[in-house]
Image (tube, rainbow, N blue to C red):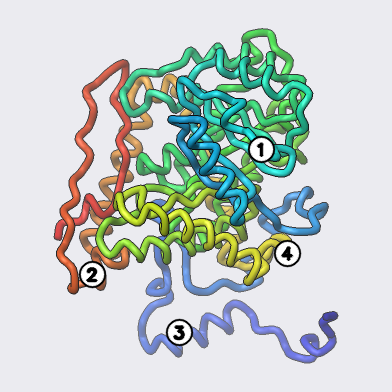
Amino acid sequence: MKINHVVFNEFEPVTLSEWEAQILKDLKGKPLSSLNFKPEIDLNAKSYYHPEEFKEQLYTKSDLLDKNNNDWFITEEFVDKDSKVTNQIILKALNVGSNGLRIELGENTDFELLFQQVMMEYIYLHLIFHDIQQVKTFSDFIAGKKMGKLSIDVPFLTEGLSTGIFQHNHKDLGLVYQSLLALNAHTLCVNGAAFADFGATATQELAIIMASLNEYFQTLTNEGIAISGIENKIAIQVGTASNYVVGIAKIRALKELQAHLLTQWDLDANKSPWIQGVTTHRNMAKNDRHNNLLRQTTEAMSAVFGGVNSLVISPYSKVTNNDEILAPRMARNLQLILKEESYANQVVDPAAGAYAVEYITDQLIENAWELFMEIEQKGGIIAAIRSNYLQDLLTESKEKYTKAINEKTQTLLGVNKYPNTEVDWLRTEKEIPSKKGDFNAFNLFNLENEFEK
């Protein structure tokens, strides 16, 4: 439907000063600052915005203009312990609505059994390898096969964080990257969602993602490997945010930050990475567990409206250890409803022009880039981890989150507000920190475990 702008031109515009004068009148003596709030512990926002505060469009990304939809892959996660059994499970998932698979491979994964009857050319496949030799085996397996979207993920920077000992030599990245150059696949995978699970704020997670990408670029360059064309090889996992506006802004900011980093390396800044949203462990609760569905719905909507390419919603049974059949179905159906009933896949960049989103996006870009530069001054992300700089940074954030959950300035429905009194409270315990290895281990952060009931 075409909007007749002439109608709107008949109204006199209201200036910022006039609007604030009316707001002050309505506040009846309260200051304008009473409308300020913190959507996250290191972000600032307010309850009103005006066009005069935005002299130019804060967020611009040329590739958005080329999109004719906002579609994404409904991706389910699996751990392969028995390839024949896993095959039956993933075939069932694909037959009831999923079109993406995120599979953590096992030591004895048999690719012939795992992908028997799976039409890989029509789906998104994200495979997590723990053995570099297994990457070569998979590469041989798919030779000559038609493939859809593919991410080959060797977690060079994240595997071992929970033990304090890196499991891979990150210089082996060059071997993997070069051996897979001929494949039309994402072979440079960064997992920011892991740090979100360790308690990182949106700002910190974005900065860590940039530092990880920069580390990979630098490593390949130091190994004498040309990185031209690497823009098409990047896939990023990002944790979904509990705050709706921050969740949208986070994905948008990530695209802009990555474009800026590519520019610094004289690469094509118009190439967006493959972005996979992943729901985090932080907001999952054992008590009143069905509220997890409400939280995940909000997180999923913000990730989709931000523009993810694929989305993983972890079933709430991951923390409750029950409803093993229902929970995955509900996680899948959240995305199906967003597509088939809400048509969220049909509107390109639906949050564009929303002042609150634009403001938070701009703030995230500035703050994350500043923190990224601080990490680089520490010698890069590996040096920042080995010196425990990142761990200390996340510990400080977790302490602030813990204070907010206990003072009830942050709501975790069914936990610190409106708990279900009809059932007994399930005890939850903080994760015991691992013994120190080469560096202080990172530990999963869960808000419910921090709540002092």
Number of the front mark, 4 or 3: 4
- Residues at marks 4 and 3, CA–CA distance in whole angstroms: 40 Å
Label 2: few (<14), some or many (≥20) within 10 Å? some
Residue pushed farthest top?
224
- At numbered mark 3, what does the secondary structure look like: helix, strand or loop? helix
Location of residue 171 in the rendering, given as x and y in whole percent from the top left corner: 55, 12
- At numbered mark 4, what does the secondary structure look like: helix, strand or loop? loop
User: Which badge, 4 or 1, comes first in the chain's sequence?
Assistant: 1
Q: Please give the residue where the numbered disc 4 appears in the rendered image.
A: 346
- Label annotation for residue 151: none
Location of residue 73 in the rendering, given as x and y in whole percent from the top left corner: 64, 50
User: Which badge, 2 or 3, comes first in the chain's sequence?
Assistant: 3
Number of the front mark, 2 or 1: 1
Given the image, on which type of amino acid does mark 1 rest? Answer: Gln
Label 4: few (<14), some or many (≥20) within 10 Å? few
- At numbered mark 2, what does the secondary structure look like: helix, strand or loop? loop
Question: Which residue appears at 52% of the width and 62% of the height?
Answer: 334
- Residues at marks 1 and 3, CA–CA distance in whole angstroms: 65 Å
Q: Please give the residue where the numbered disc 2 appears in the rendered image.
A: 419
- Residues at marks 2 and 1, CA–CA distance in whole angstroms: 46 Å
User: Which badge, 4 or 3, comes first in the chain's sequence?
Assistant: 3
Label 1: few (<14), some or many (≥20) within 10 Å? few
Q: Does 2 sit left or right of 195 as displayed? A: right
Looking at the image, do the residues carrying marks 4 and 2 touch, with CB atoms under 8 Å apart?
no
Tell which of 92 and 295 is nearer to you.
92
Tell which of 36 and 385 is nearer to you.
385
Given the image, on which type of amino acid does mark 4 rest? Answer: Gln
Q: Please give the residue where the numbered disc 3 appears in the rendered image.
A: 24
